[in-house]
Amino acid sequence: MNKNIKLMQGNEACIEGALVAGMKFFAGYPITPSTELAELSAVKLPTVGGKFIQMEDEIAAMAATIGGSLAGLKSMTATSGPGFSLKQENLGYACMTEIPCVVVNVQRGGPSTGLPTSPAQGEVMQAKWGTHGDHPSIVLTPSSVRETFDLTIRAFNLAEKYRTPVILLMNETIAHMREKIEIPDIKDIEILNRKRPNVTPDEYKAYEVKQDEIVPAMADFGSGYKYHVTGLSHGIDGFPSNDGSIAESLINRLVDKVEDNTEDICDFEEYKTEDADLVIIAYGGSARAAKSAIDMIRKEGYKIGMLRPITIWPLIDTEIKKISKKVDKLLVVEMNKGQYVREVERIAENRVYGYGKVNGELFKPIEIIEKIKEVIKDDK
């Protein structure tokens, strides 16, 4: 059997996955450590009939990505650190107007310019609450090169299905490491596309959700369907409205289309939790070190497992609560000052400990082992 095996960088895998998903437009601005995403898009998109544009800044790049999707092309942008902050206002616009797109944020040390070439996980909360107001959030985070490929495709599928921006929250570690991966046969990969209108242009209501459907059908700008798109609160015709009941109904629908479908959206991995006395919760690059630490400390007789969120938002609260009932203690390992651990503390029914670092260095398995032993000894 011929296997499509390649040695690939995380950023390369992301673009390969995006192309398989059907990406035809990329707007971006170079910034470490995401620059390869723009460079590879510039090289590869023209070969498949797609378009690449480098904008003057990250604000414009997000706006152009929204425009590309509105015109009918599966669209993506990518950035890091300060660039993600610049994208937030237009991210909110995409949420409000229900424009599907994928935003890749390769996390680096912050805040401000911070540590541009070092790994971090400091945008967990920003990915959820970075833009103002109540809005839907779907955020995925990979912990390997192959998973980056898979989750990029999934990000596009979720964006198209739920008509919302989806954030792929990588970090410098995953973006720049190289691993051998097997690219699956494309015919075995599920690709989802946005629902198109099945009515005439005169009958089309841009934000009307039909019975038994999750989101409105989406017509391409320039295809003969004329409709209004605004970041203001709007009715089913797309035109602005100051009616409070219309505003509340709209925001509830935007949030509920995600929160009511968490079983479809949320994904996670359990590792050696069956007999565990203590479970580590770790995600992204930190989960790699945690898994190695678990393998090492089990040789000493300690029963440690791991719950790895793959979907960061919506929260995998059901799984966190379930695992917290099975063990005495949870240890959350993350490269920040404690962002995800606060959510775990809110949900868990046992004792929760946090272990974070913000020095731009990866976790070492031995560091996590030392922390595990410290937590086990703590009887307070």
Image (cartoon, rainbow, N blue to C red):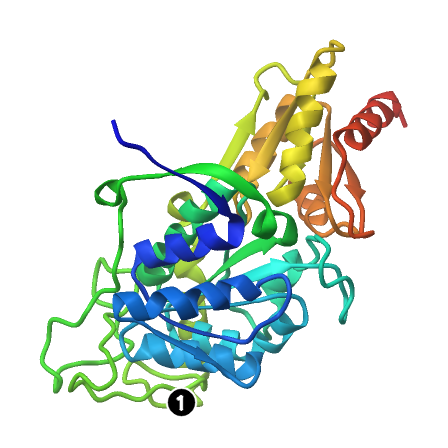
Quadrant in which residue 64 is drawn: bottom left
Left or right for 203, reference 81:
left
The x and y percentages for residue 169 are: 56, 55
Establish if 54 lies above or below 113. below
Q: Residue at x 50, y 63 (%)?
A: 37
Residue 204 or residue 296, whichever sits in front = 296
Left or right for 339, reference 68:
right
Q: Quadrant of the N terminus?
A: top left
Left or right for 265, reference 80:
left
Residue 345 or residue 26, whichever sits in front = 26
Label 1 sits on residue: 241
Q: Residue at x 22, y 57 (%)?
A: 212
Element marked by disc 1: loop
Number of numbered discs present? 1
Given the image, on which type of amino acid does mark 1 rest? Ser
Q: Is residue 350 visible?
A: yes
